[in-house]
Amino acid sequence: MSMEYRQLGATELQVSTIGFGAAPLGDVYGKVDVAETTAAVHEAIDSGITLFDVSPYYGLTLAESRLGEALVGYRDKVVLATKCGRYGASEFDFSAASVTKSCEDSLQRLKTDRLDILQAHDVEFGDADQVVNETIPALRRLQEQGKVRVIGITGLSLKNLAAIARRAHVDCMITYCRYNLMISDMDDVLLPVAEERGIGVINASPLHMGVLTEDGVPEWHPSSLEIRAVGRQVVELCKARGVSAPLVALRYCLDHSYVSSTLVGMASRELVRANLKALEFSIDPELLVEIQRLVAPVHNQIWDSGLAENRG
Ligand code: NAD
């Protein structure tokens, strides 16, 4: 099973098509066993996963600290991506001073002298003018100083990401829960500007943040009961067909032609192994039609997690 790599938009970076989402290392999906997450990081690297995504927000710096420890001796094998500007559920600061300090703090926690990717985190919660006129220029200064290789923005609101990407020069973007078996509006809203400007796109949460897993979603999950019920039906359907829903869901995302990498959260070697199977898996077209029929009533339904979808 060999990993595939893609160029991240017009940047110099090559990334593995499966990316390691390190949010679970911050205990955001439940308390993890640190020895196990460390082993998962190492096994992922040994299996060819290069892209590692984290943020100071995940576990309020815990995920970064744990990832930094796990990467000792492995730093040169990975493309290390972190974020700035979001520091709590409702704590945001996209000022130049804040993102510059955040970069320094992340470098320390991640035990490195250069980040490969630094992105302003969940920009729909900030002021679009500030992101364009202050945050992104500050990230470019960090790039000029050699502290960061490429810079970008992340968020759930596609309209907001697209609007900022039209006004400012960014290298890459992460969006989440906008392209997977449950939803595909990323293609209509974000892809046109990304393709036009050569902006790399990283797609996160192929399992719709847990909706497409056997265990279902954590308590804080913003999805409607209807979405959760459909997710459960998809999981059951896949089980009846002898395949796991996460495998189908991840493969579906890997088949996207523009996305450079799909970020999936993995806190154990078992999950790393399960997700690597997607590299050799292809989806039965009849199963896909059945899944799409089940999902149709809620397809493209987005949730309100405090974001202003129409802002910016
Ligand atoms: P996900 O959909 O990838 O995963 C949800 C849950 O499913 C996690 O607990 C995960 O460990 C578990 N899981 C993974 N593989 C599985 C498998 N094969 N079988 C069963 N369960 C499995 O959602 P996520 O973890 O929220 O997102 C992935 C990553 O994307 C995050 O870790 C983070 O790095 C990134 N992300 C970024 C943003 C942003 O920039 N704004 C937002 C969301 C996610």
Image: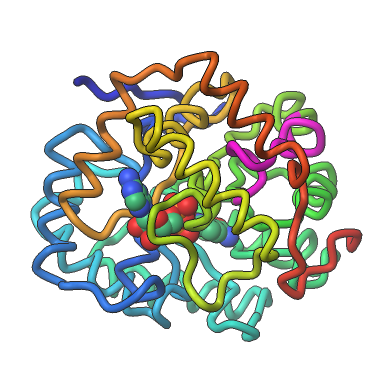
Where is 137 relative to 7, above or below?
Answer: below
| Front residue (pair 3, 193) | 3
Question: How far from the left and from the top, in percent, is residue 250?
Answer: 44, 35
Where is 229 relative to 222, above or below?
Answer: above
Residue 115 visible in image:
no
Residue at 60% from the left image edge and 40% from the top image edge:
171
| Front residue (pair 201, 222) | 222
| Front residue (pair 188, 239) | 239
Residue at 81% from the left image edge and 38% from the top image edge:
189
Question: How far from the left and from the top, in percent, is residue 289?
Answer: 62, 21
Residue at 54% from the left image edge and 69% from the top image edge:
84
Question: How far from the left and from the top, in percent, is residue 112?
Answer: 25, 62
159 relative to 238 in the view: left or right? right
Magenta-span inclusion, residue 8: no
**Could you tell me how many numbered marks the image carries?**
0
Q: Is the magenta stretch mostly helix, strand or loop?
A: loop
- Magenta stretch, residue numbers: 177-191
Task: Please identify the quarter of the rendering in which residue 294 is found.
Answer: top right
281 relative to 155 in the view: left or right? left
Residue at 27% from the left image edge and 24% from the top image edge:
3
Q: Where the N terminus falls, by quadrant? A: top left
State the residue lying farthest toward the front.
240
Where ligand 1 lies, by image quadrant? bottom left
Question: How far from the left and from the top, in percent, is residue 285?
Answer: 53, 14
